[in-house]
Amino acid sequence: MSAALEFKGVSQTFQAKGKKVVALRGISFSLVEGEVFGFVGPNGAGKSTTIKVMLDIINDYQGEVTLYGVDAHRAEARRHLAYVPEAPALYEQFTPLEILRMGLSMHGIKRKDADAWCMQWLERFSVGMNAKRRIRELSKGNVQRVALAHAMVVQPKLLVLDEPLSGLDPVGRKDVVDILTEYKQQGGAIFFTSHVLHDVERIADRFGFINKGELLTVRSPRELVAERADQMIVRYNAEQPIVADAKALRVGEYECEVAQEALPAFIAQLNQLGGHLLTIKPAVSLETVFFKILEESAAQPA
Ligand SMILES: Nc1ncnc2c1ncn2[C@@H]1O[C@H](COP(=O)(O)OP(=O)(O)OP(=O)(O)O)[C@@H](O)[C@H]1O
């Protein structure tokens, strides 16, 4: 089975005011059906350039990019792709229903129930009541929802989303996370960019962390945190605290930090004293790990 998306050694250089800017430095990654891949990195890291390469907006890159095994230079590679930019520019004088209908016809999709199908997607993104208003009358968050409905109405196999949750309120974020989760469970692949690590932890199966055009790591959020977590936070029930610096959370419930290698001895001691283990989690968050990786990459010679 071909990957939904594959980058092999992709580099991109721009000329700006007579200077060479290296936007991508030989990046390689792939994602398969049913996988959600988050692409994270600071401003200017190369995220938009990567999206422009897969959309063939940039086509003078070095390396190889394929979508479902088809070279990205060929238009048919994007037949099953839908893209939603961070600030979608939808025709302001049209209504959401017209926009979705237009999406269907641009993809050559003929359905007898076209209007009902479009309405179903607008309703799923909670903008059904705005279906016949003009785009220019809608709030930024509602335009974002219409753009996402416009992407989903054509039933793409690969969704490319630039900061998909950025303009949405907490309810909108939850709606979109639920819809994306369902889409993924049905076999859809998602590539999305984000500055928000919490979104990455919530949605992505794996993520790539890019900085200055270099892909520094490709991992699952959990793996990355676990790899770097030498200290764990342990919560337990016991009559007395097991270690002197344990924090009492409530009567008989304590929390403390324990080094990974000391965990077996700690648990054995807890059992011996008749206590119960409640939770164990890494003492570091994805955010602290990211800062560490950034520091390490800055310390390496160019
Ligand atoms: N058309 C261009 N001409 C010259 N330099 C460019 C061009 N497009 C991007 N760059 C440079 O390439 C690098 C990567 O830019 P890119 O827009 O891909 O970053 P980004 O990760 O999307 O950033 P942000 O999070 O700020 O949107 C930056 O140094 C940027 O200035």
Image: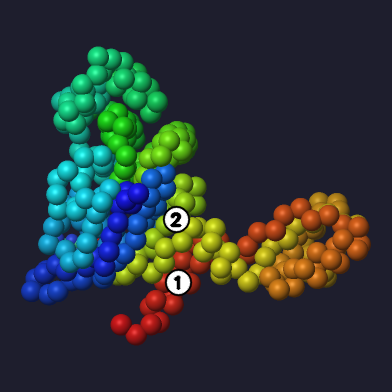
Residue 242 can be seen, yes or no: no
Q: Quadrant of the C terminus?
A: bottom left
- The disc placed on residue 206 is 2
Residue 114 can be seen, yes or no: yes
For the point 21% across and 65% down, which residue is it? Answer: 63
Q: Is mark 2 within 8 Å of ligand 1?
A: no
- Which of these two is toward me, 120 or 170? 120
Q: Name the residue under label 1.
A: 293
Are the residues tagged 1 and 2 within 8 Å (C-beta)?
A: no
Instruction: Give the amino acid type for the residue marked by disc 2 in the picture.
Output: Arg
Residue 66 position within the rendered picture, expressed as x and y whole percent measured from the top left = 24, 54
Residue 201 position within the rendered picture, expressed as x and y whole percent measured from the top left = 49, 52
Task: Work out whether mark 1 precedes mark 2 in sequence or the reverse, and give the earlier one.
Answer: 2
Residue 125 position within the rendered picture, expressed as x and y whole percent measured from the top left = 38, 28
Image quarter where ligand 1 lies: bottom left
Instruction: Give the amino acid type for the residue marked by disc 1 in the picture.
Output: Ile
Count neighbours of disc 1 (C-alpha within 10 A) and say few if under 14, some if 14 to 19, many if 20 or more: some
Q: Is residue 70 left or right of residue 236?
A: left
- Which of these two is toward me, 178 or 145? 178
